[in-house]
Amino acid sequence: MRHLRSRRVFLEQCGLGGLALSAAPAFGAMPEQDPDFIVINGYVATMDAAKPVAQAFAVKGDRFLAVGTTEEMKSIAGPRTRIVDAGGGMVVPGFNDTHNHGRGEGLLYGINAGNPYVVEYVTIQSIIDKIKARAAETKPGEWITAAFYDDTKIKDNRQLTIADLDKATTQHPVQVSLRGGHASIFNSYAFKQAGVTKETPDILGGTYEKNEKGELSGRVTDTAGRKMGSFGTRAVYTPAEAADRALKGFEFISAKFAEFGLTSVSYDSNDDIIPIIQGSRERGTLKTRIAYEASHEVCDALLQAGVGSGFGDDWFRFGGTREHTLDGALSSRTMSMTRPYIGVTPPYKGNLTELPKDTMEWAERMHRGGIRMNMHANGEPAIEQALNAYDYAQSRFPRPNTRPKLTHCSLPSAAQMKRIKAVDAQPSLFSTYIYYNADKFRFYGADMAEHMMPYRDMLDMGINASTGSDFYPGPFDPLMAIQGMVTRKGFNGETWGASQKVTVEEAIRLSTVMGAYSTFEENIKGTITPGKLADYVILSDNLYKVNPEKIIDVKIVETVVGGKSMYHV
């Protein structure tokens, strides 16, 4: 009886007494009220303003049941309650990546020209060798593609060129994609088959770049890449082989997400991934909650069916459109700018990839159908186009609480941030870029860097920004992201945009609470709060106490989603 009484007293103090004692649908009859497990002896940073710090918490089913001290949690434990000792480690809500493209197929079966997860310098010869090896087992005329080429992390200290790729093969079209997307390097075979020569003019939103001699350099940007990929054959698999590769790839990346502490991901991927995710869930290998961001084709089908954003459940829900691309990339130096890039000849201000009238037409169609707009807009010109399109759609068909998403929103003006605040737009800012891509800021300059990925300014203005890795382009390590946001210092020791530093607590909040808000799920996750989904991460060290420049070295001890361990050292 002492156990029952102490439990009742504590739960009533937490405001859950009635729930625990009488709400049979939520927790069952009183004898079944014991928590499934309690986590004790931790430093629990709940991110809940009502109880910011605790030592312990209890979990029942897939929800947090109570939060408090170790002794309080022990007092409500029953004979079947499992006890997890955090050993003094820090516990935070599960990390949320609000923009991720990761498909594990490429990681398992493709050519990785660079390291997907950490900073690593490679040689051009290593890329040539990998392509040459793949060419030896590939039919002539069939495409060979490689990913994760980071052009500022090359030991040779120069760019990969058309001539380099010609050394790998002259019998296959070759495409090596820059890690940041929006640009690729092609070989001579690919240009010949596409009918592109040095005389071919650039097109709206894309370029065929030339070297200092006026010859094709091999680099093609943004919309110009569509012509390059319009010919040739690619590897063909039977339906069973394709399904097996896709499932194994997704299970691989899902496990990787858990390994790095991600419990929720806004997933911008190809449409064929939907049945793959379903298959993974049925097999019990889905380790991360998914907010799916769909292609134009899928969105059009959902419009016809009358299905809007939010449809689904706690594990898989329709988040909105995939990023509707309005400009180029930050790391590939093709994002739209109001002034030319530094050190680029001839003068170049990046690419706007769509006419404003087309953006407005698309925005109104999605908005009327209740599908949340998600627009890729890095630079000021693209951000302006995105905001204008949203205002147009809202003026034609007003809707409350739409939270339009601005993917990247890397360099907004002060006036644009006021507009973002006014409509509660959701910037998903690059998370790991500050650390990983510190070697790219020189193309923008110190003055621009003071306003890039403006976490500090947005927090001060009350803008609901969140963190998105954009993987493949950026690693998805939340601790790498937090270190970068807190220090504004990169892997190379360079500091860019020091005025945009945030505190550790703010960085965690941006990576958890704000991710939940971004997907309209702030009432069910994002904080360690009784009644919310039991998604959390145990860390080896307290982020508030370690050297800020060593945060990246802190280890993920365990990742838990819905009360189930998805990763444990």
Image (spheres, rainbow, N blue to C red):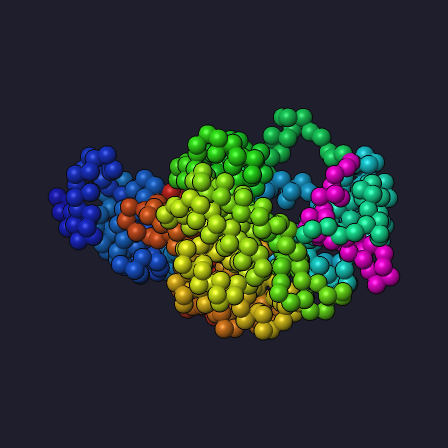
The residue under the point 52% across, 63% down is 412
Tell me, yes or no, whether the highlighted magenta stretch contains residue 188. no
Relative placement, left or right, of 509 versus 103 is left
Residue 18 location, quadrant: top left
Q: Residue furthest front?
A: 396
Residue 41 location, quadrant: bottom left
Residue 102 higher or lower than 248, as above or below: below
The residue under the point 85% across, 59% down is 214
Can residue 528 be spotted in the picture?
Answer: yes
The residue under the point 20% across, 42% down is 20
Relative placement, left or right, of 178 versus 45 is right
Can residue 468 be spotted in the picture?
Answer: no
Residue 271 location, quadrant: top right
The residue under the point 40% across, 59% down is 422
Which image quadrant: the N terminus?
Answer: top left
Which residues fall within the magenta stretch?
206-232
The number of numbered badges drawn on the structure is 0
Relative placement, left or right, of 249 versus 462 is right
Q: Position of residue 276 (x, y in %)?
A: 54, 33
Comparing 42 with 348, the one in front is 348
Q: Position of residue 534 (x, y in %)?
A: 35, 46
Q: Position of residue 446 (x, y in %)?
A: 60, 73
